[in-house]
Image: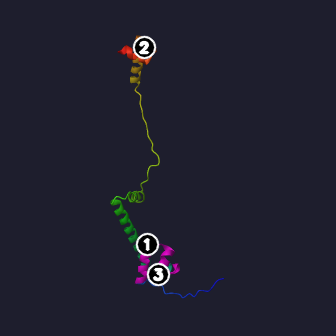
Amino acid sequence: MFYSLPYEARKVEATEARLNRIYDAAKLGLKGDTLAMAAGMLPTEYRQLCQLDPIAEVAALKGRADGEIEASRQLHQAAAEGDAKASLAILQHVHGWVAKQAITIDVDQRISITAALAEAERRVMVIENNPSEMLMPLEQKQRVAL
């Protein structure tokens, strides 16, 4: 069941008190209809006021800017005092920093053909000169060397 609500049309003016309420609501981060309601106006009244007198939008913009400045100062002060979470938030949201999700390691190893041939030739010479040494267990090789 719908009850009739008494509605009286109010005069929409950009008074100093109304502009201060718009500024205060915008400083808290409110926008649109919530800003209008917090400033004591209906959303249609707020939109009408913004169309009739652009100073209402200026008050909202100034309030948002001052609110962001205050929050930014608090965040930078916390970071300067050593708060790691505040520092990370500044890096991520102001500077666009993102932590690496994966690490890539490039291994570039080059084999020298001349060094490999020299090593192979040295091994062949050892086998040709002393073939029985290759068949000996490691312990016997150590005893022969002593």
User: In the image, residue 14 lies at what x, y percent?
Assistant: 43, 83
- Which mark identifies residue 133? 2
Q: Residue at x 41, y 80 (%)?
A: 20
Q: Main secondary structure of the magenta part?
A: helix
Q: Amino acid at mark 3?
A: Leu
Q: Which residue is mark 3?
A: 52
User: In the image, residue 104 lies at what x, y percent?
Assistant: 45, 42
Among numbered discs 1 and 3, the one appearing first in the sequence: 1
Tell me the SS state at disc 1: loop
* Furthest residue in direction left, as rendered: 80
Q: Which residue is mark 1?
A: 28
Q: Amino acid at mark 2?
A: Glu
User: In the image, residue 17 lies at what x, y percent?
Assistant: 41, 83
Q: Which residues are magenta?
A: 16-45
Q: CA distance from mark 1 to mark 3?
A: 24 Å
- Which mark identifies residue 89? none
